[in-house]
Amino acid sequence: MELLAALPGAALAVRYVWLPMLPGDTFEAAAAVATRLREPRAKHYWDGDRRLGRRLGDALSIPPEAQGGGIAWDVYLLYGRGAKDIAAPGFWMHQLALTQAPRLDAVEFRRRVVELL
């Protein structure tokens, strides 16, 4: 992924979690995208039962009436070095109709990543 390649630092770790939210969101589709986004610092996971999506939805206070029924998806979470609690990101953005965090802005997100490095 170009964004990752442009970011320095072996300390950067990226985790993609794919889950079925839209028609066509399958394990096979996620695996195909994971191949395109291959990068040594990145790992890809499949959350077919949406367990992590639900847990993060609760932690991020994504309401059940939100798109996706309270499940965290299309969210971008940042954690500082040594963070232990996946349910407590230091910063996050989204592409949903929410007000508790900013909508995804690639420039701002990258700035925050660099700040953490």
Image (cartoon, grey):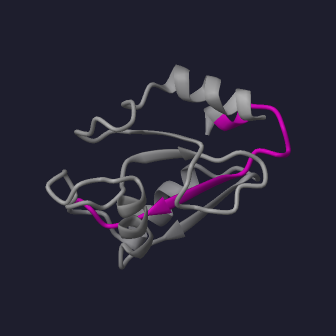
x%, y% of residue 83? 71, 55
Q: What residue is drawn where x is 19% and y is 51%? A: 67
Residue situated in front as seen by the camera: 18 or 82: 82
The question of residue 5 being in magenta is answered with yes
Does the image show residue 33? yes
x%, y% of residue 11? 83, 46
Judge whether 42 appears above or below 27 on screen: above
x%, y% of residue 32? 48, 60
Judge whether 16 appears above or below 48 on screen: above
Magenta segment range?
Answer: 4-22
Residue situated in front as seen by the camera: 92 or 88: 88
The question of residue 55 being in magenta is answered with no
Residue situated in front as seen by the camera: 68 or 63: 63
Does the image show residue 6? no
Q: How many marks?
A: 0
In the displayed structure, does residue 66 sit left or right of residue 80?
A: left
Quarter occupied by residue 85? bottom right
Q: What residue is drawn where x is 22% and y is 58%? A: 68
Q: What residue is drawn where x is 23% and y is 59%? A: 22
Judge whether 87 appears above or below 104 on screen: below
> Which quadrant holds the N terminus?
top right
Residue situated in front as seen by the camera: 90 or 76: 90
Judge whether 107 appears above or below 73 on screen: above
Which residue is at the far right? Answer: 10
Q: Is the magenta stretch mostly helix, strand or loop?
A: loop
Quarter occupied by residue 45? bottom right
